[in-house]
Amino acid sequence: MPKKLIFIDCDSTLSSIEGIDELARLRGEDTFRECENMTNRAMDGEIAIEDVYGARLDLIKPTAKECEQIGQLYIETIEPTALDCLAELRAKGWEPIIVSGGLTQAIAPFARHLGVDRVRAVDLIFGSDGSYAGFDGDCPTSRMGGKMKVIEADRNELDGEKVVMVGDGSSDLETQAFVDLFIGYGGYIERAKVKAEAKRFVYKLSEIPALLS
């Protein structure tokens, strides 16, 4: 049976934080500022995500335990209307999917809190002691254009009749031509390019269900 799928970005959308930046904060203010600058330049579309992805992780070398900490922080910084929004969307027949350039191991506890079964993010690789050993470069969302590939794959697998994408960054915006509706989100960061080009733009997730009626 055809489904209605809504893909939602995680960082600065479902939660106020950027998980990778919060991991960097654990390494001190200088590392945090350096990582934050790289993140913002990528989300603003100044540089490609793949140009900073490995560099940020090599700088931080996050452990498995630290990813669990960030998972809890996502929950603590949840967008205030997220749970109600998701409940209303489900009642209208929409299946929410998290699609993110963030880290699967950090997002997973947050997804459970949100009741979202499917997370399409980037898998980290850890050593037997939980130390950082790299990331899976085959995960599409570690690169520009990756969210489009994920959406297309899930649309085909789940027989998606209607597909919507919600997010704050340039990697979200680039999906606009491949979905039925792209909704830009500016509740935490209003990115000029996203606001200018998005067909719809909201500041609260609770505004979304009405746009899909």
Image (cartoon, rainbow, N blue to C red):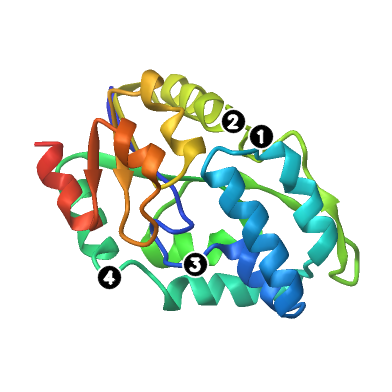
Look at the picture and state if 146 lies above or below 125. Answer: above
Q: Are marks 4 and 2 in contact (CB under 8 Å)?
A: no
Q: Which residue is mark 3?
A: 17
Which image quadrant is residue 84 in? bottom left
**Relative to 116, 137 lies left or right:** right
Q: Earlier in the sequence, mark 3 or mark 4?
A: 3
Q: Which residue is mark 1?
A: 143
Q: Which residue is mark 2?
A: 146
Q: The C terminus is located in which quarter?
A: top left
Residue closest to the eye, 75 or 38: 38
Separation of residues labelled 3 and 2 (CA atoms): 21 Å
Q: Are marks 2 and 1 in contact (CB under 8 Å)?
A: yes
Crowding at label 1, few (<14), some or many (≥20) Cα neighbours within 10 Å?
some
**Relative to 92, 118 lies left or right:** right
Separation of residues labelled 3 and 1 (CA atoms): 20 Å
Q: Residue visible at 70% across and 79% down?
A: 29
List x then y, in percent, for residue 24: 71, 70
List x then y, in percent, for residue 68: 64, 73
Given the image, on which type of amino acid does mark 1 rest?
Arg
Q: Which residue is mark 4?
A: 80
